[in-house]
Image: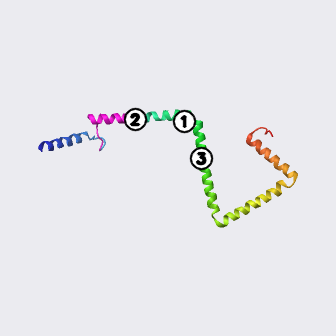
Amino acid sequence: MESKVQDMETKQETMEKKISNDVPGMMTTTGKSAGDSSWQEYVDLVVDFLAKVPEQLGSFFSDYQKPLTTTGLIVASAITVYITLSVLDAIDNIPLLSSILELVGLGYSVWFVTRYLLKASTRQELFSEFDSLKQQVLGGKADN
């Protein structure tokens, strides 16, 4: 029993010696036991793996840049469509707002028909505006 008490006291003394005087609570390493070395091997493996991750990710992204971009755009467009449909469904559930928006759309359609489609001269104006817009978007001359 006394030997156990003495062993505990010596362990406590060695622990007190390990505490650094410079930084409170800082432990100094005095030696490695068998358990510490196996633990250090695992830590070294993890550190080595984490050191290689940026290189591997960089080469992965450079090799698969186009497919990743395409996949990202598809996912982003699917999310956008889902959110848009949700907002339109929410607007449709508001009783008076959906009717007002239908009237606005009907009014705009009537205005567009009377403004651009009834006369031949205004149809030519519409086609020239469309061609200029197509030329701005596509660049250069647009072939028909």
Q: Quadrant of the C terminus?
A: top right
Residue sitting nearer the eye, 74 or 14: 74
Q: Could you tell me the amino acid type at mark 1?
A: Phe
What is the x, y in percent for residue 79?
59, 50
| Residue at (76% x, 43% y) in the render | 134
Determine if the magenta segment contains residue 52: no
- For the point 60% across and 54% down, the residue is 83
Q: Earlier in the sequence, mark 3 or mark 2?
A: 2
Local secondary structure at mark 2: helix
Residue 78 screen position, x and y as percent? 60, 48
Q: Which mark is residue 47?
A: 2
Q: Position of residue 138 (x, y in %)?
A: 74, 40
Q: For the point 80% across and 47% down, which residue is it?
A: 129
Q: Is residue 45 above or below residue 78?
A: above
Point out residue 88 in the picture as x, y percentages from the top left corner.
64, 58
The residue to which callout 1 is attached is 61
Q: Is residue 26 magenta?
A: yes
Label 1: element kind: helix
Q: Is residue 31 left or right of residue 43?
A: left
The disc labelled 2 sits on which kind of residue?
Answer: Val
Q: Provide the residue span drawn in magenta.
A: 25-46
In the image: residue 144, left or right of residue 100: right
Mark-to-mark CA distance, 1 and 3: 18 Å
Quadrant of residue 34 within the rendered picture: top left
Which residue is under mark 3?
Answer: 76
Which comes sooner in the sequence, label 1 or label 2? 2
Quarter in which the N terminus is drawn: top left
What amino acid type should be assigned to the residue bearing mark 3? Answer: Ala
Q: Find residue 61 and report its image quarter.
A: top right
| Label 3, label 2: how far apart the Cα atoms are | 35 Å
Height in image: 131 above or below 105?
above
